[in-house]
Image (cartoon, rainbow, N blue to C red):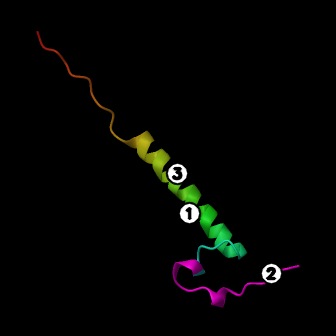
Amino acid sequence: MAIFIINHQFTGIAKYFNSYTFTGKRNSVLTTYAGIAVIFLYLKLKPKKKKAVATK
């Protein structure tokens, strides 16, 4: 039994991110990958803490 969903049934954000259409699934996956990449780049590129230099 096949379920056919027409994109016109969705409104708002559900039009772009849903689990019923191929495009909606793809957009969800791409958003997830982009979020993971942003977190990785933030952690990789943020300035490192410098150790305190003790002066004598």
Q: Which residues are magenta?
A: 1-14
Q: Amino acid at mark 1?
A: Thr
State the SS at label 3: helix
For marks 2 and 1, give the one nearer the viewer: 2
In this picture, is 11 found above or below 46?
A: below
Kindly report the distance in space between the C-alpha atoms of the residues bearing marks 2 and 3: 34 Å
Tell me the crowding category of disc 3: few under 14, some 14 to 19, or many 20 or more residues within 10 angstroms, Cα based: few
- The foreground one among 53 and 8 is 8
Residue 36 left/right relative to 21: left
> Where is residue 32 drawn, in percent x and y?
57, 58
Residue 53 left/right relative to 56: right
> Where is residue 43 drawn, in percent x and y?
43, 42
Task: Please give the label number shown on residue 31.
Answer: 1
Q: Which residue occupies 27% across, 28% down?
A: 50
In this picture, is 36 found above or below 26?
A: above
Task: Give the residue at mark 3.
Answer: 37
Chain-order first, disc 2 or disc 1: 2
For marks 2 and 3, give the one nearer the viewer: 2
Task: Give the residue at mark 2.
Answer: 3
Query: In the rendered view of the protein, which quadrant contains the N terminus?
Result: bottom right
Q: Amino acid at mark 3?
A: Ala
Tell me the crowding category of disc 2: few under 14, some 14 to 19, or many 20 or more residues within 10 angstroms, Cα based: few
In this picture, is 25 found above or below 42?
A: below
Query: In the rendered view of the protein, which quadrant contains the C terminus?
Result: top left
Chain-order first, disc 2 or disc 3: 2
- Tell whether label 1 touches label 2 (CB within 8 Å): no
